[in-house]
Amino acid sequence: MSAIDQPDVITLPEDLRPRLERALAVWLPWQRWFGAKGRPVSAVELIQATELADERASGGPLGLLAVVTVHFADGAETERYLVPLGLRATLPDSLAGAVIAGFDGCVLYDATGDPELNALLLLLIGKSAQRGNVHFVPELSTGFAGASRRGLVGRPLGAEQSNTSVRFGDRYLLKLFRRATEGVNPDLAAHRALRRARSRHIATLLGAIEGELAGEPATFGMLQSFAANATEGWAMALASLRDLFAAPDAPAAAGADFAAEARRLGSAVAAVHADLARELGSSTLGVGELARLSQDLLRRLDFALSVVPDLAPYADPLRAAFLAVADLPAGVPVQRVHGDLHLGQVLRTPATWLVIDFEGEPAAPIAERIAPQSPLRDVAGMLRSFDYAAQHQLRLFTGSAAQLRRLADEWTRHNRDAFLAGYAEAAGADPAARQALLTAFELDKAVYEAVYETRNRPDWVDIPLRAVRRLVGQEVVR
């Protein structure tokens, strides 16, 4: 019987389940995508195990798509994770780093590193297969079901923090959503909407892995075309700054002028916003909603002030900026947005800019992540990213601090203006026309950054603090 035709029912021996759960309780906290770093795990409960293939009779793997619930010693709310697992009698040397535990002469391991099981996931999507309550769904309009997949080796990318993506050569990218939650993942929903709109600014959606959790629909994975010959926006920005700082006296250092790309990026983001609004709808905020938005900003500020003592001198002007949101005229447009837009979430291909990762904050409930928001939130996120790129690269250079600081500020201002110009041209509306709201969102982002840096990189907290000083109109010390 071939792997594609095998039954999907898997019943773990009673003595194996507790050992597997104990092994996962030790292994999970060390994974990059585990979202509860520093919280002691009291137990892991296996709640779902879908058999993908059992080739052990021929020396191959048993493949499982498992979902586990993680319980914490502090009694805090549990979290659920998707964990693709493999079980082999003999493990290839290439999988030595994926080992979780040994059981009765077999080795349990993280299956995302196994090319054989990765290829099976691709095959199951192409065949529109079903395993238990897990559905492998091709996007038939793309022709993926008939595409050739022979000889493609799936290898996981290593840079992600909250998911695991498997690259199949230069053709496909399979993203596995590690946080398992009820509801259609916002990334999948946004890409389906943008595919309907024939957007030029996303990688082609080819399929998905969907299932159920607690009787509700859930998304476990998403397959897209791989953006070959693409460069991340963050890397492009850093290269531009590196060239600028390396030749600070040159009137036009090679690669330093990023403004043309920033303008094109602004146009691409505006086009994506327009397509999302057309496909998923839009509305406006009334007086009551603006008041609630203002209170949300103030609540986040109060929390940040309790974590970041260095924000205290700016508390009053920050509160004033957030209170002003409640006094804005009704009619502020809101819609589905990206939710976490920055230079690391865009790719420059030879043809255009692509926007990626519409998932939002994985730890937040899906209802919160897909709630209509002002597109200015995305604009503010990108504006902050230009500043972060300049300040990040500035730390790597020695020389005249004042001169390099001036160049960093000029680069940031020049490219922020170019991005806004490109956005305004494509959208038919200038984001700067709602300056009070745009500034409030920028400040909210900078406050969030201050909390993050205080907790993770305290010597970097001056970057968001410097932005806060500028945005509230206080002098920036050079």
Image: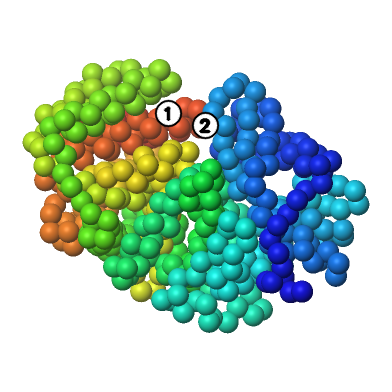
Q: Can residue 189 be seen in this view?
A: yes
Quarter the C terminus occupies? top left
In front here: 382 or 284? 284
Quarter occupied by residue 35: top right
In front here: 193 or 168? 193
Identify the residue at horizontal 28%, vertical 29% (top origin): 297
User: For the residue carrying disc 1, how many other residues have a C-alpha within 10 Å: few (<14), some (14-19), or many (20+)?
Assistant: many
Q: In the structure shown, which secondary structural element does the residue marked by tag 2 occupy?
A: helix
Residue 454 relative to residue 405: left or right: right
Tell me if residue 306 comes above or below residue 98 in the rendering: above
Residue 62's label in the rendered image is none
Q: In the structure shown, which secondary structural element does the residue marked by tag 1 occupy?
A: helix
Q: Mark 1 touching mark 2, by CB under 8 A?
A: no
In the rendered image, residue 334, in percent from the top left (x then y), is placed at 21, 46
**Mark 1 — residue?**
451
User: For the residue carrying disc 2, how many other residues have a C-alpha within 10 Å: few (<14), some (14-19), or many (20+)?
Assistant: few
In the rendered image, residue 80, in percent from the top left (x then y), is placed at 58, 40
**Mark 2 — residue?**
456
Q: Can residue 407 be seen in this view?
A: no
In the rendered image, residue 176, in percent from the top left (x then y), is placed at 56, 55
Q: What residue type is labelled 1?
A: Val
Identify the residue at horizontal 77%, vertical 42% (top origin): 17
Q: Which amino acid does label 2 sit on?
A: Asn
Residue at mark 1 to residue at mark 2: CA–CA distance = 9 Å
Identify the residue at horizontal 60%, vertical 78% (top origin): 149
In the rendered image, residue 441, in percent from the top left (x then y), is placed at 26, 37
User: Which badge, 1 or 2, comes first in the chain's sequence?
Assistant: 1
Q: How many numbered marks, from 0 up?
A: 2
Identify the residue at horizontal 17%, vertical 59% (top origin): 427
In front here: 335 or 354? 335
